[in-house]
Amino acid sequence: MLIAENLQKTYRSGGQPLSALRNVHFQVEPGETVAIVGPSGSGKTTLLGLLAGLDRPSGGRVLLDGTDMGALSEDGRARLRREKIGFVFQSFQLIPTLTARENVAVPLDLAGTSGGAARADELLGRVGLSGREHHYPTQLSGGEQQRVALARAFIHRPTILFADEPTGNLDAATGERIIELMMELNRELGTTLVLVTHDSGLAARMRRVIRITDGTVVSDERGTA
């Protein structure tokens, strides 16, 4: 499903090169649940952005379902994301001028697919937000906004979901509900799940934990979750 092949990412800082990722290599099988963990500044979010095609590597390549994302144009990567990728951000990234229903339906609207409103209402019901379809983000709590973001990520039935600290801005009870929803949708749809987290309890619920330190993979362990 996903192959990271000798990934490198280098930035310029004060005129000097700063290496964020070095020789990162692994592959993820369809339906796997994977946590990427490590200290702050270790390169976790940078790696997630490369895997999702939100950024280009300085070296190496990412193959998603057999497609080399680095060989695609920006429009090509955007099209691939619309077709196969869901992404849940720590900061929710909802559009403030759109209702919950409209936010969830955005991926289908951009793809020109009909039935977005009905599918959005179905997913909002799944995440416990029936009756909140017409509310704007400012009228929703943080946990409700994250549930809207989760529904949006799943509306086009992605083959892989990336999540960046999906419970980082939530209280423990709400975070638990979000994780249960993600795992439930993973089981039902067979969606591959790759997430970045500081939460050791959440990481332990994944079938696999990849640990990064100073931009390199230092361990890759499969558990029994």
Image (cartoon, rainbow, N blue to C red):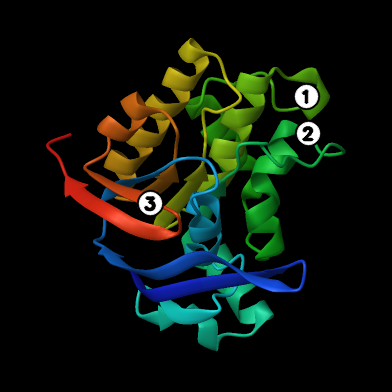
Tell me if mark 3 has few (under 14), some (14-19) or many (20+) residues whose alpha carbon lies within 10 angstroms of its own: many
Q: Which residue is mark 1?
A: 135
Helix or strand or loop: what does disc 3 sit on?
strand
Helix or strand or loop: what does disc 1 sit on?
loop
* Amino acid type, residue under disc 1 in the picture: His
Compared across the picture, whether 145 is left or right of 203 comes to right
Q: Which residue is mark 2?
A: 99
Quadrant for residue 224, please give it: top left
* Amino acid type, residue under disc 2 in the picture: Thr
Q: Position of residue 200 (x, y in %)?
A: 34, 28
Q: Position of residue 203 (x, y in %)?
A: 32, 34
* Amino acid type, residue under disc 3 in the picture: Ile
Q: Image point 53% across, 82% down: which residue?
A: 70
Mark drawn on residue 212? 3
Q: Earlier in the sequence, mark 1 or mark 2?
A: 2
Q: Image point 50% across, 56% down: which residue?
A: 48
Q: Nearer the viewer, mark 1 or mark 3?
A: 3
Helix or strand or loop: what does disc 2 sit on?
loop
